[in-house]
């Protein structure tokens, strides 16, 4: 049985992701994303499941930067989870006519519910927590405080909270993608309900003295007809204006095309690292869900 670390406490979307891919394994919550990754590096857990990208709020830079600069753990899988946010309160507050004075949650969750909060609780105080699960736990532990949490259904069940408003997120197609990181587990040992795609994630550092280097990098993929689903720049932390690029290619590493790209980029003076070659899964059939919403 594997030990799977995730961003806790219990009731977070990261726990949903971890249980989607590893339903029968041991799940260990940690307070921060870096701690999850550190515990894999130290061998305390076999796997870390961490958020990397939200459809509304974009990339989780903390995950990407820590993966590149601190703990270069292999990516062995990915999973996408639909995000449904709810406005939750303690039952004792509901019983006496709940009038929330403050709402707490993760910054991304607050941002994802911006329109609802502006229309329904325009002047409410907002406080940020490490995770939606942390917010739900705080409300459960402080029954005398007129505070609401924005969190998911799992958190409501875990901490015994009641729904004041359901599905308060601004966009119905909100989803978060999570990465699965491990030093010892192989990508073929990860499986999920629905396959979305195969990916190879590369880190590319451009030569500082080569004009048009980024164009040349993209051309190396284009003429080989390799589809790129994402390209993102992040600072190298070596000086202002110095960046590396994380590129997702929509296929697994093969014997010809991706090795050819790497050889071509290295010939240009680029640094190239493979961060992982893996399959991405989903909790739900996204194609069916998209069709039913039309």
Image (tube, rainbow, N blue to C red):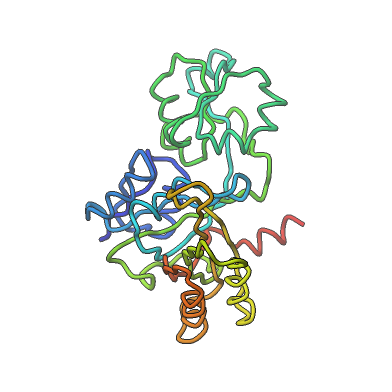
Image coordinates for residue 191, horizontal then vertical, percent: 42, 67
Q: Quadrant of the N terminus?
A: bottom left
Q: Quadrant of the C terminus?
A: bottom right
Q: Residue at x 54, y 32 (%)?
A: 150
Nearer to the camera, 228 or 187: 228
Which residue, as the protein is rendered here, is positioned at the far bottom? 256
Q: As drawn, is 157 to the left or to the right of 82?
A: left
Which residue, as the protein is rendered here, is positioned at the far front? 209
Number of numbered discs overlaid on the protein picture: 0
Image coordinates for residue 179, horizontal then vertical, percent: 44, 57
Nearer to the camera, 215 or 110: 215
Tell me: residue 57, above or below residue 193: above
Tell me: residue 4, above or below residue 262: above
Q: Residue at x 57, y 15 (%)?
A: 101
Q: As drawn, is 18 to the left or to the right of 214?
A: left
Image coordinates for residue 293, horizontal then vertical, percent: 73, 55
The quarter holding residue 112 reads top right
């Amino acid at each position: 049985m594997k030990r799977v670390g995730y961003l806790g406490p219990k009731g977070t979307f990261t726990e949903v992701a971890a249980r989607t891919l590893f339903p029968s394994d041991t799940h260990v919550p940690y307070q921060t994303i870096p701690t999850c990754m550190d515990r894999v590096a130290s061998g305390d857990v076999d796997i870390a499941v961490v958020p990397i990208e939200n459809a509304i709020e974009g990339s989780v830079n903390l995950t990407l930067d820590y993966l590149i600069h601190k703990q270069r753990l292999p990516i062995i899988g990915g999973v996408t989870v639909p995000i449904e946010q709810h406005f939750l309160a303690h039952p004792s507050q509901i019983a006496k006519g709940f009038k929330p004075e403050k709402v707490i949650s993760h910054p991304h969750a607050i941002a994802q519910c911006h329109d609802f909060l502006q229309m329904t609780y325009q002047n409410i105080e907002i406080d940020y927590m490490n995770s939606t699960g942390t917010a739900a736990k705080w409300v459960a532990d402080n029954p005398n405080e007129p505070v609401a949490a924005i969190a998911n259904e799992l958190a409501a069940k875990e901490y015994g909270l009641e729904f004041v408003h359901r599905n308060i997120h601004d966009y119905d197609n909100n989803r978060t993608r999570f990465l699965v990181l491990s030093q010892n587990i192989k990508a073929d040992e990860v499986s999920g309900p629905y396959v979305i795609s195969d990916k190879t994630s590369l880190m590319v550092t451009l030569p500082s003295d080569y004009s048009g280097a980024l164009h040349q990098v993209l051309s190396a993929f284009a003429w080989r007809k390799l589809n790129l689903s994402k390209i993102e720049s992040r600072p190298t932390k070596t000086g202002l204006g110095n960046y590396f690029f994380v590129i997702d290619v929509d296929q697994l590493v093969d014997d010809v095309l991706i090795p050819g790209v790497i050889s071509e980029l290295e010939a240009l003076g680029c640094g190239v690292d493979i961060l992982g070659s893996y399959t991405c899964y989903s909790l739900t059939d996204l194609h069916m869900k998209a069709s039913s919403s039309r």
